[in-house]
Image: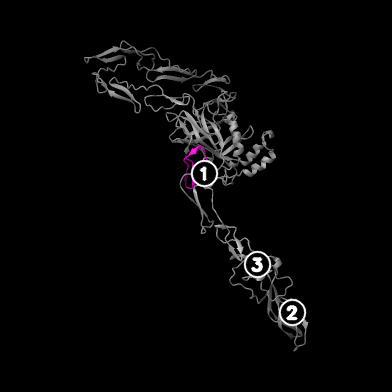
Amino acid sequence: MRRALSPVLVLVLGCAGSDPTAAPAEPVTDATTADTSGTSGTPDTAPPVTCVPTRPCDDGNPCTYDDRCTAGLCAGTAVDCDDHRQCTLDQCDGKGGCLHEVAEGTCLLGNVCLPDGATNPNNGCEACDSAKSRIAWSIRAEQSACDDKNPCTFADYCKKGVCKKGVARTCDDENPCTGDDCDPGLPDGCRHLPISGACDDHDPCTEGSVCLAGLCRSGKTACDDGNACTTDTCLPDTGCAHVAVPDGTACTDGNACTADDGCTTGACVAGPKPNCDDASPCTNDDCDEIFGCFHTLTLDPCCTGLENVCDDKNPCTVDACGAAGGCTHQQATSPCDDLDPCTKGDACAGGACVSGGPNTCDDKNPCTEDSCNPATGCQHQATAGACDDGLACTTGDACVGGSCQGDTSKCVCQPTFATTVAKLATLVMGDSGTPGQGLDVDQKATTCAPADSCSGGIDNSLAPLSGILNQNLGKALAAGQLILLLELQSPKTDGTPFPLALYAAKLKNAGCDVTHDVCQYLVEKTTVGTDCKPLVVLNNAKIVGKKLTAGGPGTNFPFSITLFGDTVLQVTLYNGQIVGDVSLDASGTQVTGIANGLLGGGISKKAISTALEQVPDEQLPIPKAQIAPILDLLIVEDLDTKPPAGPDAASAGFRFDAIGAVIVGVKN
């Protein structure tokens, strides 16, 4: 079938229309532009045409030429005009030549088929527009979007076929500790170089914050009044608070000539003078306010240096030196030790130590037989038989291995608690993922959360919930509904690891101010195991300087969180860790409180959703059906608690301060 062809769109022998300057582009693959719709580019198979030898003939096939009659049939030399381009309509001219028309809706540029709208890879303001030209690039409409290949501009636009620069990129990362500019030579353009100087960490409880390595590092705590007899705290809403520690708390008044100083109504009161007596009659004992006790030699004629020449080494005489230098030895009546472990009540009589009577070695243990050996002292041999362990709830009490033991199956476990206990007095969820608002839970300094408000590797994906949680957390703490205790078991201040146990508890002495006073608490039975040991223990706690650290990756423990209303929800905190600055007593060894504390970890998104279902509808600010999708949108799981399974928990960060507390037992 022959077709009339436009001379503008016809490519003769596949050569016309080539653009040697255009870059190769992706070929058209849409079947609608293929060259198979009614074209005649290859020899047809038609019925044979009879003819008369020696006479001219026509075989009726436009894709043959030089037709001749052979053996009564007309046939010519075949021509294949298929140029294998999907966007051309191929035709034979019947004379051995070929014609190639570019199909509607396509362009043939640089020997490549392109659909309408395809842009020039070398000039974003040129495109294939078959209505204008099918063999040359057409200029796109004015103001069309383009890319000038400069990463420091955006919203570039076309003008008269040329891509013009749009709006300059500002590159501002809203970080006061970086200098922001744009370098066209960089793949992304923007660069953020660390700068130095002062900055604002947006924490009213710190001062002197400075830029370090591109991050605003919090300065020292602004609320420290330098008084060991106050607990210094700061809340963003109320500012600094200085609460007097319990009267009797050890302190030092700075005078070396007082001992056992103690706090009274928030002030350090001097204790009694220290005993500077070195028990030597040959020294004068005195005290200096800065250096403490010191001793100078006397002019006593009985002394030669520090040695008293009149000392007869008898504890039952009082030795003295006469004015003329002679020694006297007055008999004493004071207690003494005759060096026999099987006697007691020894006393001086007649200048000698006289035994007071036999030592029965009674250890008040009904399960031992007590005796005394002059060579080895008291001995306590285990016995058998019935006894009373002093607990009314036990049965079948009997002596076993030197101790009275009974059946405790009907008893509530009453473990022995440490004396160093801290109670969380404040607990606030961090409002961002920046230093001071949480911890690096995943131990990856290059990651942080939430993505739009984080730095320094701090993970706090739940920060968007802080506005909802903090009001309820504050109320629950002040009302004593939420009580969390940290038990420091034999803490060391030299970096030696020690156990730190966590308990939920209830107030024992009603009326005690749980936010300021050292109150008595009963721990919940659910936090103590049947073996009388705490269920949650961080065995890697340590204090270096005054910095407490505990927990970390792999540490999981139950955690109470007040989500809505008065409902306290129990969830598991994964990779839980605690840091804080401890307050020490005058000896520098006893912990009396924790300031600038941070608690971090991960909480399962599913657990939060499940916990939400437990909250009564009347305690919710809006219908539960509306809260669920909001939480689903806000909570992003960013922690992998079971690598390499992938993120399965949302990171959370809390700030806290803790005061002293006393555990008196387990709540029945």
Q: Judge by depth and name the residue closer to the eye, 92 or 411.
A: 92
Residue 490 located left or right of residue 651: left
Which mark lies nearer to you, 1 or 3? 3
Q: Quadrant of the C terminus?
A: top right
Q: Is residue 207 magenta?
A: yes
Per the rendering, the mark at residue 128 is 3
Which mark lies nearer to you, 1 or 2? 1
Which range is magenta?
A: 201-219
- Mark 3 residue crowding within 10 angstroms, few (<14) / some (14–19) / many (20+): many
Numbered disc 1: secondary structure: loop
Can you identify the residue that label 1 sits on? 443
Real-space CA distance between mark 1 and mark 3, rounded to the nearest whole angstrom: 53 Å
Reply above or below: 190 against 125. above
Q: Are marks 1 and 2 in contact (CB under 8 Å)?
A: no
Residue 115 located left or right of residue 181: right
Q: Amino acid at mark 3?
A: Cys
Real-space CA distance between mark 1 and mark 2, rounded to the nearest whole angstrom: 79 Å
Numbered disc 3: secondary structure: strand
Q: Amino acid at mark 1?
A: Gln
Q: Judge by depth and name the residue closer to the eye, 497 or 549.
A: 549
Question: Which corner quadrant of the image does residue 395 belong to?
Answer: top right
Res 442 seen here: yes
Can you identify the residue that label 2 sits on? 61
Per the rendering, the mark at residue 204 is none
Q: Earlier in the sequence, mark 3 or mark 2?
A: 2
Question: Which corner quadrant of the image does residue 312 belong to?
Answer: top left
Q: Amino acid at mark 2?
A: Asn
